Image (cartoon, helix red, strand yellow):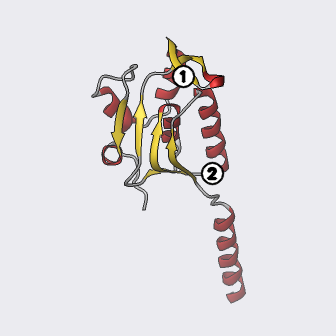
């Protein structure tokens, strides 16, 4: 009986060590192309990886809020705005050429209800940036990093 318990404990310890890949740590991410960030978030979730936001997570980066294991540290923040088609994103020219309602809707669908309510209380996703502090994120239901 004792060997069965010890074996079970060893198996549980090994399983938890293997099943907990390191989280992605966001320190200062300006965002970018929505489709790329959506794909990255899907991969993170499939791998069971969490996200720790320690700095600014702006624009398309905010899709990490969909991750069930996302948390925000005291120095973390989010910057939201509506998605747009950029002049030449391949060469770093992210000037707004045209709004992208489909990408905005995809991003919106990634946000938890508390974050959506916070955004709506400030006029919704528009071209005007909205900055959410860690404290505001915690109040909106995003988990605080320990």
Picture residue at 41% right of the left edge, 51% below the top: 143
Asked if 48 appears above or below 12 in the picture, the reply is: above
Residue 14 image offset from top left, x and y in percent: 69, 71
Which percent across, then down, holds residue 104? 49, 21
Determine crowd level at label 1: few under 14, some 14-19, many 20+ residues with C-alpha closer than 10 A: some
Say whether marks 2 and 1 touch (CB < 8 Å): no
Residue located at (62% from left, 58% from top): 22
- Helix, strand or loop at disc 2? loop
Residue nearer the viewer, 131 or 2: 131
| Observer able to see residue 11 | yes
Q: In terms of depth relative to the viewer, which is nearer, 105 or 73?
A: 73
Residue farthest to the top, as pictured: 98
Q: Is residue 40 above or below residue 33?
A: below
Nearer to me, 127 or 43: 127
The residue wearing badge 2 is: 48
Q: Quadrant of the C terminus?
A: bottom left
| 50, above or below 93, in the image | below
* x then y, percent, for residue 93: 57, 22
* Mark 2 nearby-residue class (10 Å; few <14, some 14–19, many ≥20): some
Image side of residue 6 versus residue 111, left or right: right
Give the x, y percent position of residue 6.
68, 83
In the displayed structure image, the side of residue 41 where residue 72 appears, left or right: left
Q: Which mark is residue 4?
A: none
Earlier-in-chain disc, 2 versus 1: 2
Query: What whole-number distance in Å separates the C-alpha atoms at marks 2 and 1?
Result: 31 Å
Quadrant containing the N terminus in the rendered view: bottom right
Residue 99 in view in this figure: no
- Looking at the rendered image, the disc whose residue lies closer to the viewer, 2 or 1, is 1
The answer to whether residue 42 is above or below residue 4 is: above
**Residue wearing tag 1:** 94
Looking at the image, the residue that sits furthest to the bottom is 2
């Amino acid at each position: 009986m004792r060997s069965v318990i010890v074996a079970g404990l060893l198996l549980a310890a090994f399983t938890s060590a293997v099943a907990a890949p390191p989280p992605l740590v966001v320190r200062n991410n300006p965002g970018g192309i929505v489709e790329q960030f959506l794909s990255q978030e899907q991969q993170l979730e499939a791998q069971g990886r969490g996200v720790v936001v320690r700095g600014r997570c702006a624009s398309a980066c905010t899709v990490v809020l969909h991750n069930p294991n996302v948390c925000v540290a005291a120095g973390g923040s989010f910057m939201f705005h509506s998605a747009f088609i950029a002049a030449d994103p391949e060469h770093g020219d992210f000037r707004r050429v045209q709004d992208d309602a489909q990408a905005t809707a995809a991003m919106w669908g990634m946000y938890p209800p508390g974050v959506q309510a916070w955004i709506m209380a400030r006029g919704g996703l528009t071209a005007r940036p909205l900055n959410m502090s860690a404290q505001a994120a915690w109040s909106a239901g995003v988990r605080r990093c320990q």
